[in-house]
Image: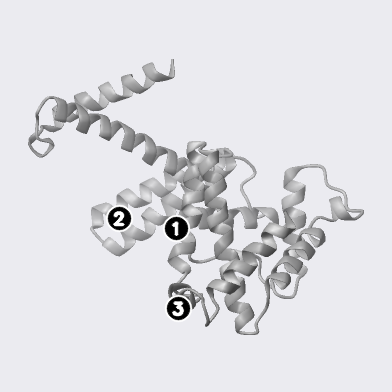
Amino acid sequence: MADEFLRLIGIMRKLRSPEGGCPWDRQQTHESLRPYLIEETYEVLDSIDRGAYAELKKELGDLLLHIVFHAQLANEANLFSMRHVLEGINEKLIHRHPHVFGDGKVETTDDVNRQWERIKLNEKHKPKLLDGVPKHQPALNRAFRVQEKAAAVGFDWPSAEPVWDKLDEEIAELKHEVKTGDQHKMAAEFGDLLFSMVNLGRKLGIHPEESLRLAISKFTTRFRYIEEALEKAGIDIYKCSLEEMDRLWEAAKQHREEEHH
């Protein structure tokens, strides 16, 4: 395994070489690679969602390539090397798992999370609890991580029950602002409602990003059923009535349920 990893590093070094390298690879920077890194990450997630493990193997390789690519760019700029990246993650994993590599004691997953956050807070480069939550990640996931980190130090609802009351409160506030017609205040209250929904999902053990992805997939499957049914009937979807589409939507739901039985 180590030899294949070293081979990958050598290939990337060759691709970046001024002599005999690839013009495209030589032009790339940390900034220019950002969209590709994000795309590859989502392709990994898509493979996992579909249970396509042959594809997952390929997508993980593509993602690893980007890690090596960024490390090579940093090495050329005399910032750090791939060895430094590996040393850093190895040291961090050992340091933050004293219950595995030391004499620390934990009993539950919550204990592990609290210990992890406590250790991070004691590290000089992480002076604030929420500093480690990237600002550019999807908002639902960021909300979940912010709440998770706050919960790790005890700033959390004791159970899911109070969150239901909070949801009712946020819905009432949103309805009030809708009546006023103030778009800015409506957006703020809508955000509060979403944030509370994320909190409820977290308390119920449901990840909001994954849950919404499932909902989108379900909607897409059912809407595709409507499109295909209308195509078979020779009906233009743009001229189809809402009542007819609703009927086909219900048929799509029934069709899906029958497939699962």
Write down the quadrant of residue 228 in the picture: top left
Q: Position of residue 20 (x, y in %)?
A: 51, 77
Q: Earlier in the sequence, mark 1 or mark 3?
A: 3
Q: Position of residue 3 (x, y in %)?
A: 72, 59
Image coordinates of residue 124 in percent, x first then y, are 74, 75
Distance, label 3 to label 2, CA atoms, is 50 Å
User: Of the residues shown, which amino acid type is indicated by label 3?
Assistant: Gln
Q: Residue furthest bottom?
A: 78
Mark 1 is on which residue type? Glu
* Residue pointed to by mark 1: 39
User: In the figure, is residue 201 to the left or right of 261?
Assistant: right
Visible in this render: residue 131? no
Asked which secondary structure carries label 2, the reply is helix
Residue 74 left/right relative to 261? right
**For marks 3 and 2 on the same chain, the one whose residue lies earlier in the sequence:** 3
Q: Residue at x 37, y 60 (%)?
A: 188
Q: CA distance from mark 1 to mark 2?
A: 37 Å
Query: What residue did someone put label 2 on?
Result: 177
Q: Residues within 10 Å of mark 3 (few under 14, many from 20)?
A: few
Please, is residue 216 above or below residue 117 in the view? above
Disc 3 marks which residue? Answer: 27
- Residue 157 appears in view: yes
Name the front one of labels 1 and 3.
3
Q: Nearer the viewer, residue 188 or 144?
A: 144
- Indicate the quadrant containing the C terminus: top left, top right, bottom left or bottom right: top left
